[in-house]
Amino acid sequence: MTMQQPAPGAAAVPPPIEIENLVRTYHMGDMRVHALRGISLRVAHGEFVAVMGASGSGKSTFMNLLGCLDRPTSGRYLLEGIDTGTLNRDQLADIRNRKIGFVFQGFNLLPRTTARENVELPLVYTHMRRRERDRRAADALANVGLVDRMDHMPNQLSGGQQQRVAIARALVVEPAIVLADEPTGNLDSRTSVEIMGILQRLNNERALTIILVTHEPDVAQYARRIVRFHDGRIVSDAPVARPRDAASDLETLGAETPCEDDSP
């Protein structure tokens, strides 16, 4: 993807993710587990990157560090130019809430709370006024096609609809990056394509920077770039020559059995 260059004399905008020689070592009794072994990576604004690797390859540790849920043993992680290694616990919590949207495999919705209230939750910690929270939650749910499900509880929604609520919750803070950890792992194949279609549309229309962890090669092909981990190192980092188009794939699936989101 060709990146637009700043105008002469304009200040360069820092990339959302810049990682330099990142190391993470865990101590388990007398053992040292080298989860990450000095990785470096740069992700520009508007990229859609899939992260792949077998269990134990380091990709989950990498995502925890990107999400400011853990600290590296050494090396630097800059999030929009901010060195996260210099931040204390409260500052890390603040940057998580303001700059990072999370989408999990298990949805992680509050069970006795409506879709709208689930989406509003990250805004509660910003002390935003209720009317503005309501407006932004409604806009986020509209972006994922759930205008008519705002007042439904999670148990009244299909799995695909619950994941859409989770995506809306990630969007509502207008984050610098969205971290999606196996977002299709609990979904059937057609609903998985629908979720990837939403992520592709957000990436294309809003230039949203997305980092997607997946075990599924077919799902990774919807991204624009694939980074592969093995034994705590990045072993390949390459653009996807011809990314799959979820909208076209859904048209192909159109004559097949209706997806779960069509059920009452």
Image: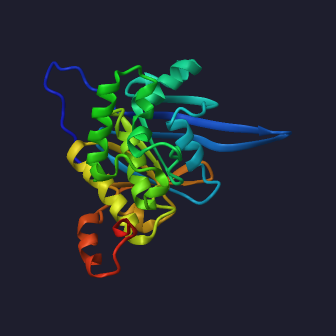
Q: Is residue 106 visible?
A: yes
Residue under the point 57% across and 34% down:
69
From this view, report whether residue 21 is shown above or below residue 190: above
From this view, report whether residue 113 is shown above or below residue 95: below
Please state if 96 lies on the left or on the right of 259 as rendered: right
Where does residue 88 sit, x and y in percent of width and height?
57, 18
Please state if 70 lies on the left or on the right of 11 as rendered: right
Q: Residue furthest left?
A: 8
* Res 206 quadrant in image: top left
Where does residue 193 sit, x and y in percent of width and height?
35, 65
Q: Nearer the viewer, residue 126 or 243?
A: 126
Q: Nearer the viewer, residue 17 or 256?
A: 256
Image quadrant occupied by the C terminus: bottom left
From this view, report whether residue 166 is shown above or below residue 136: below
Where does residue 61 sit, x and y in percent of width and height?
59, 43
* Res 240 quadrant in image: bottom left
Residue under the point 36% across and 32% down:
173
Q: Is residue 42 visible?
A: no
Where does residue 229 sit, x and y in percent of width and height?
54, 53
From this view, report whether residue 226 is shown above or below residue 116: below
Residue under the point 65% across and 54% down:
56
Give the colour scheme of this rendering. rainbow
